[in-house]
Amino acid sequence: MDNASLLSAVREKQPLVHHLTNWVTIYDCAQLVKSFGASPVMAHAAEEAADMASIASALVLNIGTLTTDFMESMKLAARAANAKGAPVVLDACGAGATPFRDRMVAALLDAARIDIIKGNASEIARVAGEQVKTKGVDAGSVEADLAGIAGALAAARDCVVVITGKEDIVAGRGARYVVKNGHELMSRVVGTGCMAASAIGTFAGVCPDDLPRAAVAGLVCFEVAAELAARDATGPGTFRELLFDRAASLAGRDVAAMQKVS
Amino acid sequence: MDNASLLSAVREKQPLVHHLTNWVTIYDCAQLVKSFGASPVMAHAAEEAADMASIASALVLNIGTLTTDFMESMKLAARAANAKGAPVVLDACGAGATPFRDRMVAALLDAARIDIIKGNASEIARVAGEQVKTKGVDAGSVEADLAGIAGALAAARDCVVVITGKEDIVAGRGARYVVKNGHELMSRVVGTGCMAASAIGTFAGVCPDDLPRAAVAGLVCFEVAAELAARDATGPGTFRELLFDRAASLAGRDVAAMQKVS
Amino acid sequence: MDNASLLSAVREKQPLVHHLTNWVTIYDCAQLVKSFGASPVMAHAAEEAADMASIASALVLNIGTLTTDFMESMKLAARAANAKGAPVVLDACGAGATPFRDRMVAALLDAARIDIIKGNASEIARVAGEQVKTKGVDAGSVEADLAGIAGALAAARDCVVVITGKEDIVAGRGARYVVKNGHELMSRVVGTGCMAASAIGTFAGVCPDDLPRAAVAGLVCFEVAAELAARDATGPGTFRELLFDRAASLAGRDVAAMQKVS
């Protein structure tokens, strides 16, 4: 299915997208999912994370404000999603910033099947075992063969890898795409990276059998909405609100006309 | 007192409204309370939840991102509010979605007096022991005699029950109201259900002796502000911001002219 | 350096500003820092709080939704910042509201060096040991010699003390300033106090050798942005978004023309 058709599928099927995410952008992730017409839920207690995952169509994990307890709940949720066959997206938010984060990501990848690993260049390079240094959660540019790193990590983990940036790379399971949508204002707003993972999870919830396509559709719809929002924004504050508006009113014909995928 | 007079009372008395709520919409709950002219506070540590509740005019509990530790703090806060005579509002957010949530709600109802139980149709049906299935925190429509369920739960627990939806039902303590305000955009925004509970808590803080009236006034003022916000919104993002604006500037005469209560 | 030059320094050096803050306004703190051109990070796990602090240019601590675990992480982060020589800002959010908060603040001040203590009048009076009563986190006005209290606390703790209000007092390390910028709408929005601390931390990150100057510059730039935002806002919701816009586009000449510092 094409990107516009997948957007229609999200609105029609309204997938439940379970999140264990960070406390900074938790609202933004929920509102973006809801703007797309899907149904967000956030439940991190160890006693219910698996139960909630087992009724969800997709699971999004984000390590932005990770703790050890939270990681245990992530594992429970991921295994429940695995058992159900629901796609699991990991936003490797801040990977490389501290040894703790790196250990936790490694433990999570060993404990459950992660279907899509998403991060910026330095985060994915770190998850792939490359020697890079991340500055907090905000870094990004590393000099490296990003497509090569993405492909190798995808092959090693038998998953889809998404590297976000000026151009987004989607690699794995025999596919390879580059998405060139988006707007410079996205880098001025807290949470666009987290929202990208939620967008991917939302579309994965209605397209579990072709996750590279789902990832591309999620990125395209999110970034086209961002381009539309940027037209009327006067800065990062108004941009954020208009992004939710434009995602909610996003027309299939705009997606088709504005998408830049190769 | 009528709805407009209760709004004036909120602005004049500026009640302190204590919350133990979820991490997704915690800002929205706080800002709505503040927009109405009252004073929000959020403090969930077991060591201070009761102390904070004992200086507050109302307590709002929301189980959206519940944990067992958090539930223990909720019990402490609720008992302190009970001892002081301050109204306690429970938003049964996501009740029915997992067995854990159902157990926690039941334990809370046994551990302290809850004065107002608020939820959408499926949540309240679940708390009342009806056999329904909730989809995450976003569900709502169940085929049932909602007024009958609300009345029965209110009688069984000697409390006020609020079922939010296209028409809100307020039942209990000898009263029965239906509020028909609101706007379709409310269902497109994360947190409107949580904010409804905070609005009820705010008005309960200045009208503790007639909680059905307080609940109606809170719902009416919140939903009239939403109707005014919807006039200028282009989607859920701008709607949310304008909702805070319109709640802050809400005129008593608009409340009186636009309220739809039967 | 003057205030406008310090704003340029923030944008050029993009300091990493680590936060252990509250769950209500965590987004707002992050977005304000990012709007100024710096890089926010929030990481509170005990296992990484110190590591993150050791790569940051400044650390902002906020006790708004404090727990005992969180306080332990705060101590670890503060000591790491101390060891590195990075400035530590404490927002004494809600000090005086409960005995727990007072105990935790006292323990924190004993466990690490706090370079800047910031609060409203009643919070700072409480930290200074004056007998005042705080109403939640929203209070403020106490009848007292505020400049005297600030100076005495600064001397006793060898730190900088900032009392925010209609006029902000910055005292300590031989300096004494009053900042008279800002707008009435700031008191209608949740999180302006927390954002003030983040602004101070951001500027302290590029001006660690003159913290009174850094605090003044942070307050001035934040409050001038607020004045500009208020021109186009219709209430607290739109004001908040425009505040992020105006902070992002803040011109040095506007800072120079509008600053009110004595």
Image (cartoon, coloured by chain):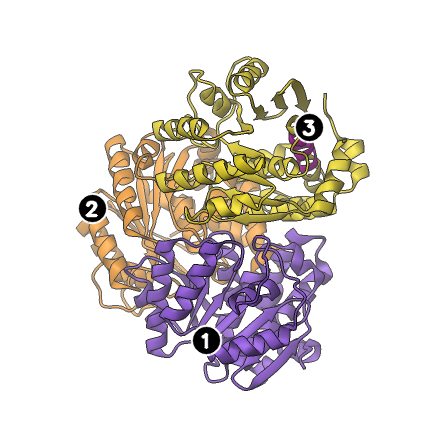
Chain colours: A purple, B orange, C yellow
Q: Identify the residue under disc 3.
A: C213
Q: Position of residue C259 (x, y in %)?
A: 75, 30
Q: Decide which of C136, C37 is in the foreground and name it.
A: C37
Q: CA distance from mark 1 to mark 2?
A: 49 Å
Q: CA distance from mark 3 to mark 2?
A: 59 Å
Mark 3 nearby-residue class (10 Å; few <14, some 14–19, many ≥20): many
Q: Identify the residue under disc 2.
A: B158
Mark 2 nearby-residue class (10 Å; few <14, some 14–19, many ≥20): some
Same chain, labels 1 and 2: no
The quarter holding residue B76 reads: top left
**Farthest-out residue, front:** A131
Q: Amino acid at mark 2?
A: Asp
Q: Which chain is home to disc 3?
A: C
Which is closer to the viewer, label 3 or label 2? 3
Q: Position of residue A243 (x, y in %)?
A: 62, 62
* Quadrant assignment for the N terminus of chain C: top right
Q: Decide which of C146, A6 is in the foreground and name it.
A: C146
Q: Amino acid at mark 3?
A: Arg
At a point 66% along the width and 53% down the height, the residue shown is A236
At a point 52% along the width and 78% down the height, the residue shown is A154
Q: Identify the residue under disc 1.
A: A115
The range drawn in magenta is C213-222
At a point 45% along the width and 67% down the height, the residue shown is A60
**A186 drawn magenta:** no
Q: CA distance from mark 3 to mark 1?
A: 50 Å
Main SS, magenta region, reads helix
Mark 1 nearby-residue class (10 Å; few <14, some 14–19, many ≥20): many
* Quadrant assignment for the C terminus of chain C: top right
Q: Position of residue A176 (x, y in %)?
A: 60, 82
